Image (cartoon, coloured by chain):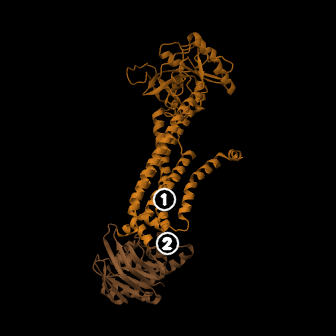
Amino acid sequence: MFETVWYALPVLVQDMLVFLGLLVPLAVTGGICLYGYRVWPLIRGLLRKHTAISATFVLLIAAAVGISVGLIAQERGLREGTARAADKFDLIIAAPGSEITAMLAAVYLQPTALPLIDGATYAKIESHELVDLAAPLAFGDSWEGVPVVGTTPPFVDHLSEGLRAGRVFETMEEAVAGANTPLQVGDVVEPVHGDGSDDFSEHGHAYTIVGKMNRTGSPWDNAILVAVESVWEIHAMPTGHGPDWDGTLGGPFDPSQFAGTPAVLVRAEELWANYSLQSEFNTSQTMAFFPGNVLAQLHALMGDIRQVMSVLAVATQVLVAVAVLAGLSMLSRILARRMALLRALGAPRRFVFAVTWTFATVLICLGAALGIVFGVIATAVLSMVITALTDILVQARLAWPEMHLVAGFVSAVAVLSLYPAYLASRRSLLDDLRS
Amino acid sequence: MPDLSIENLVIDSASGRRLLEVPNLTVPSGGSLAVRGPSGAGKSTLLFAIAGLIAVTAGQLKWGETDLVGMADTARTTFRGATFGIIFQDHLLFEELSAENNAGLAALYAPRQRRAGIGQVARRMLTDLQVPWDDPRSVVSFSGGERQRIAVARALATEPPVILADEPTASLDRKTADGLIADLLGGAKDAGRTLIAVSHDPALIDACDRVLTIEDGRVTDHV
């Protein structure tokens, strides 16, 4: 019955209810502690009186909360970013080997040595009735550290979904620049062999930038795309076309003139067709895989890491909470004379308990709230750093899981704060009054 | 209004050292008693015992029929809140609060139905003692005389039947001290309150009905 009602609720409502549910211990504890008392004038006064100490506690808690929620949000953002980067790569067919290596090369443009698919195999892929788009890739050159990737004009259209500026390359001397490259239409680049770091040699072949892609959120944003034929040609290999080629770039390629490709990016209109192609091309000659599946496996591994990170995040918060409670116990000594005065004037122990608990809980709540702000800032900064380092667009955002973590933390520490409050209420009245 | 009666009161320190012996003392309801003696003689110890703030080793200490010696801590705190208005030597105000909030401090933990009344009396007392109750400044910026008068207003805000004061004029100049003595004793007489004050101030001592002298933890004179 409960499950039926629960799963019938919108996800947003579920998240809000979980959030509120996690705050129930705080509300119940607060309700019991504060029943019948007005503590706020004293709490405001104590915060003013002990501004520096209070600010230190708040910042300590905020830092712990900010780091924890920032890390968890970042991990999710990274998963979403890697998945988004692979979004345009429905099916990859490569020579048998490691799917992860092939995916890293084809999707994330990581330099790796892969065996090549020959012309006959490529022709079989290209001519398959279910294939709507097949694009060979050619790597090996770069311009000022920016990889130059050979492919076909239809794949550029597919990847970029139209261009931000200019048009797709139409000759072997033209190129399209990724969205994050510093290149503009009209610029001329002359690639070198390799990644340009050492032992490079110029090919003596220049490209004119004729178009600029839209942002894809993948490392392809930081690449220069050229005709695969030109890459083959400047490496002294056949261009993929026979002697009667009219110069039109892209397939169909002549199998006898095909220089070989480490991976073919394949797309079929229908989902079932992609699965059919994957099944058909998983042979002794080729392996076909969905990058999404490989990523899912990696994410499953990351899921374990995420759990470890979550445990670490909670452990960090618990350690900070313990440190804060120790600090509050010390603070209760600073407040001791005032609390003794209250009791001397006739205030019940429970009032002293309520004042100390509320003071601790206010600091915790302020710290948690500020921690969320820190988390948002940390997430934004980390996203920028990771995006810059990996070329994968990471757009991490704090979401309900982080809010749940914060709510649970606040409630847990609020309950733990009962202990220093208890200690404060049990101190020797006379000793404190005369101190 | 309860009478105070003490018989064979003995208070020892935790280490066993004798701090105070009072064979017999009675303060009738509405009367005033000054407790004098050299520093460290045990005057404040007696005042704290009368307030139920210090453990009694032996003897009897009663307010009317209420024996503070055998009373549980919670009940003693409740009795203290309902019976005494206490003025401490060094004011012991909450420095970050305003005069009004200090004087009406008891409203924070009093039963809901009493809060408004405590607030009203606190404001009236501040006005009578010439402290502006609506001044929003924290009391840390007030003069010593004003702070002591705020402490008096706090002691009177709950309209207690007994005022216990520890060196109430110690930090005041003569003129301010005389004003405070007149307020304390005049107010006590008008309201029929009992006043017990520990003091070195001859003016306050002379103004009280009776005087108790304590030296080295023993009563040496009682007039």
Q: How many marks?
A: 2
Q: Secondary structure at mark 1?
A: helix
Residue A392 lies, with reference to residue A103, above or below; the image says below
* Residue A375 position within the rendered picture, expressed as x and y whole percent measured from the top left: 49, 47
Q: Is residue A28 left or right of residue A271?
A: left
* Residue A383 position within the rendered picture, expressed as x and y whole percent measured from the top left: 49, 40
Rendered hue of chain B is brown
Callout 2: residue from which chain? Answer: B
Amino acid on which disc 2 is placed? Ala
Q: Which chain is orange?
A: A
Pointer 2 residue: B75
Say which quadrant the C terminus of chain A sits in.
Answer: bottom left
Please give the name of the residue rendered at 37% of the width and 90% of the height, measured from the top-left corner. B209
Please give the name of the residue rendered at 43% of the width and 62% of the height, measured from the top-left corner. A424
Foreground pick, A125 / A285: A285
Q: Is residue A243 visible?
A: no
Q: Is residue A274 left or right of residue B3?
A: right
Amino acid on which disc 1 is placed? Val
